[in-house]
Image: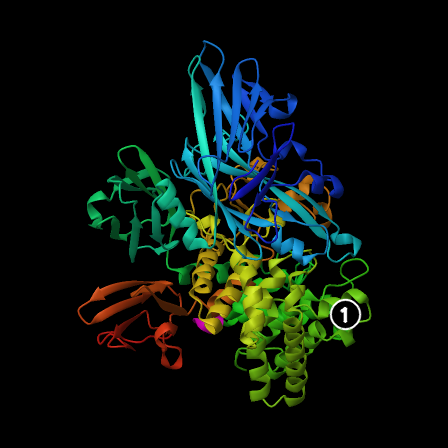
Amino acid sequence: MENKQFSLEISPSGNLTNLVLKEDTHQMNWVMDSSYLNQSGYDEKDKLFGNFSLKIDGKIVNSVDIFPTISQDNAHAIVTYTFEQVEVIMGYDLTQSENRFVWNITLKNRTANELNITDFAIWSSFSYVMYRLNDLNLQTQYSAAVFPSISKSYTKLACVRRSNEAPHLGMYQTKGQTLSVGTYCAYNNLFFESVSPSLDGLLFHQLILAGGYPEGFKNADWLYEKKAIILPGLGEKEWEYSLEPYKDQNEFYLIGQKNYGHPIFDFEPLAIADQNYKFAFELPKDQDLTDAYIEYLDEDGVRKKENIFEDLTQEKNKYQAKLVFNTPGEHKITIEINNQNNDSVILNVMEPIKKTIENRSHYISNVLFDGENSEIPYSYSPISNQGESLGKLSLVLKNNLLGRTNFEEVQKVEASCVHYIRPKWFKNGDFTKPNDLYGDFYRCMDFEYIAHVFYLLSQFDENILQLNHSDTYLSWAADVFSLRVNPDLHHTPRGKEEAGMLGVFFLYIDELMKELKNRGITEKYEEISSLWLKIAQNVALNSKTYKAAVTEHFYDNAGFGPATGALASTHHFDAAQKYGELVLANIGFSNDFRAQSPDRWWEALSYMIHSLWGGVTAAACLKAYEELHDSRYLKAAYRATIGILYCYDTNAKATNTKLSTGEAASTYSIAGPHINRPDLSRNRFGQSTFYRDGGIFTRLFTKEEETADWDMGEELVAYLDGFGKKTFLYEENGTVYVVNGSIDEVDDGLLITSYAPYPTEYYFYDRNLHFTSENGETTPQVLLVDGEFKLKKEELLTRE
């Protein structure tokens, strides 16, 4: 079947097995390919596009249990599944427009009795694949990320080719209600077989039209419905989705508005309690706004609803309001159109982020630190062989460098560096002889975290440090960094290969080199500078093949994220832009702040937020913006960052895992339901929760009860070096926008209020303007007046 835009094939089982955009030079199949499942040994044929399951009055029926009847011509097919009580009819229609493909689902009651449909879920399995083949062309041109925007009347899915090369594919709801979008993961992981790359897998997406969860299931997610369908005798219910190609995020929304009547929202994913927040949206010209309201849970968990219809100002079909939220937690803003259709956005309201970070630092130091007489002296719980576990130490040090210095917190980290970290990771403390902590191998990636802790420790004064001079720790950092990046210091193929890979060290390498130079540690400076420039040059030379996108895994934002940041900061701009497109395709855009995350699905076996690598990817994206000045990177970096902060948010109410002051959880499953583990649906957790699932997880973790924050911290250090102190302005179509803050028109000009916990820098690259406070004074507000940044006259600069 085909029209001008699409070519598609339907199997005898009624599945959509091939969906190609004719204009696409790569001829990518946008739906999950059963032939790939066969050749890779995956047994998920029941999850191909169009398969479904129904639960009727307690009885389950599945599409795979029967053969449908199919009537088909050149541009239209009707696939009918007939069961005892119901009929499910799939219409695949290319006749309504030469540029679109319409998918219709009709559920008919064949009986005269009312039916209770407690579950109705249909697989919309787009090509969300990490291929097992080490072929970067496959990974980037024939795989898509899928970002859902769930709404009562206007659900849509943005399928983004991982190369970020158009055309992409959008799916727009035009009839019925989609309650949610769930995911199921199939994967293969050879981590302990000393194979690199070691991981491949697929994520199958499921449209939830009724129910979606096991019987009796409840979770804290109050933002989306889990309701059943009551189907009258001989009645029917209809859903419809229209698919079209689009070239970029902006066009994705414009197509929805122009062709399908979807509103377009302009909202920031984060609001700070008691601070001004600007909310805006645009309706299609033939639609009327009939209501608008906010829903949230108060401090006692009671659902509140506040009407904001009167707060909105209108200019033609555009609406906006200045809002102030008093209660931290998730907020849902809903607009009603023509008295019948509803659309919504979900944003997070946080207490001042500085407070969150300080509480986290105190918790790590007072609760997680194991003292001299503990089983593993001077360690921080939970114990892990992986260097990521040391990120929490870097966070404690960074917080103490920026805020009030707590001597005891710094000294605990120093003791851990000397008595725990050095002897654990290095034989007899010799930085050239790493210990094989993973059976018969070690990971080079661990060393970049160790070097960062040593470097940050070297920034403290001698009156704070107790065991060594600060220059000693700086030399240690240089030695460990050399081991991390110098292949000649390794004697195994794996060690040599990993030494040449980029990692989180791009976040601090420039500072480390500058400090070595300033302190006269010249020999080590020259060694590191040479190694760093060589790595960056090699990555740039290999950027045409995306080589750095492969890490331990076949395709990984832990590769292409750091590559983007490193190449941008070393001014390999062409290569940075090439990798940068992979980052942009990796970061979601959605009506829900939690679905705007960089995805690293294997940490949750679901579409997810992963605090560490999501945060590192966000930081790399921001570095790309600071060098390339393309506002796509700025907006994507900020969207991603807000999801990361959710992992530390102790005021979150829509997730089962409630965090006490200072606690954190590294992983959040965006999808609901999480079909592999329904209990993890829209919930925060640590990967050790998979311990009871067996397999590789029993070798990665010792018990399920391990705390959920073992690999957290490094990403907050990256945040503190970026949005933690910087606020940005940019200009589009003559309008000035702010990122990481709010903007208000006042008599003197534009008043910019920063959301940064340590606001010291303001940038407006489009006008070549910047402001940096002197001596690290925090500057929460600045005025933009007559083309320059100025301080408010009544403001007193403060420094912690």
Mark 1 nearby-residue class (10 Å; few <14, some 14–19, many ≥20)? some
Q: Amino acid at mark 1?
A: Lys
In the rendered image of this protein, does residue 605 appear above or below residue 792?
A: above
Question: Percent from the top left, x then y, of residue 327?
Answer: 33, 49
Colour mapping used in the image: rainbow
Please name the residue shown 61% across and 61% down the image.
558
Q: Which residues are magenta?
A: 400-405
> Along the line of sight, which residue is nearer the eye, 610 or 267?
267
Residue tagged 1: 496
Q: Is residue 745 above or below residue 84?
A: below
Q: Is residue 615 above or below residue 602?
A: below
Q: Is residue 741 magenta?
A: no
- Find residue 659 and report its horizontal and vertical position in percent: 48, 48
Q: Is residue 653 above or below residue 431?
A: above
Q: Residue at x 38, y 63 (%)?
A: 740
Give the percent coordinates (x, y) of residue 218.
Answer: 49, 32
Answer with left or right where residue 751 lies relative to residue 404. Answer: left
- For the C terminus, the quadrant is bottom left
